[in-house]
Image (spheres, rainbow, N blue to C red):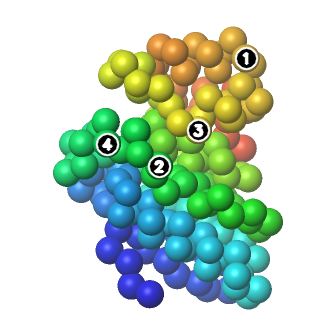
Amino acid sequence: MAYQFMRYEKRARIAHVTLNRPQVLNSYHNPMLEEMVDIWQDVKRDDDVWVAIVSGAGQKAFCAGHDLKGEERLEDAIFKEPPSLHYGGIELYKPIIAAVHGYCLGGGMSLALGCDIRIAADDAQFGYPQPKYGLMSFGGHQRMPRMTFPGIAMELMLTGDMIDARRAYELGLVNRVVPRAD
């Protein structure tokens, strides 16, 4: 299947899943989420795929979360039942690696935290900016307190502050920090 907002390739038992909206920092909207769910279902079904790597296209971002400036009104996106950001409610028993560079914000951070392993480029910036807009995260609030100190998690989730890759590593939110060139 051809995708408009995602890239999906399978090579050497690895599924390469790329968020492909670099012009909007790979921020997602419902059509992109629907494509992502379709991809995760294929990853689950394909016995030749042993692991998946999810990344963001372009130079600036892994994923900046929900597209706040998109055609869909924000209140419509929040109050209707959206497709799952992560795995579409699929029980996926294959490891998923997040290859994070640039901005990893809001729903993008929730996506990364939902992965089994997170590798961050040294230019990665993590955060939940939702409090600055009077909003709350859909997924990260459940995951982050289990991954780092509860007080630190609350600070990040309630202030909207961002942290760099090194600090994310120190807090246990990423497994490794690598030079961007790698």
- Mark 3–mark 1 distance (CA, rounded to whole Å): 16 Å
Q: Quadrant of residue 149?
A: top right
Q: Which residue is mark 1?
A: 150
Q: Find residue 81 and name its label.
A: 2
Write the residue at 68% across / 64% down: 90
- Mark 3–mark 2 distance (CA, rounded to whole Å): 14 Å
Of labels 4 and 1, earlier in sequence is 4
- Mark 1–mark 2 distance (CA, rounded to whole Å): 29 Å
Q: Which quadrant: the N terminus?
A: bottom left
> Which one is closest to the eye, mark 4 or mark 1?
4
Of labels 3 and 1, earlier in sequence is 3
Q: Which amino acid lies under the numbered mark 1 shown in the image of this protein?
A: Pro
Of labels 3 and 2, earlier in sequence is 2
Name the residue nearer the viewer: 127 or 180. Answer: 127
- Mark 2–mark 4 distance (CA, rounded to whole Å): 9 Å
Q: Which amino acid lies under the numbered mark 4 shown in the image of this protein?
A: Asp
Q: Which residue is mark 4?
A: 76
State the SS at label 3: loop
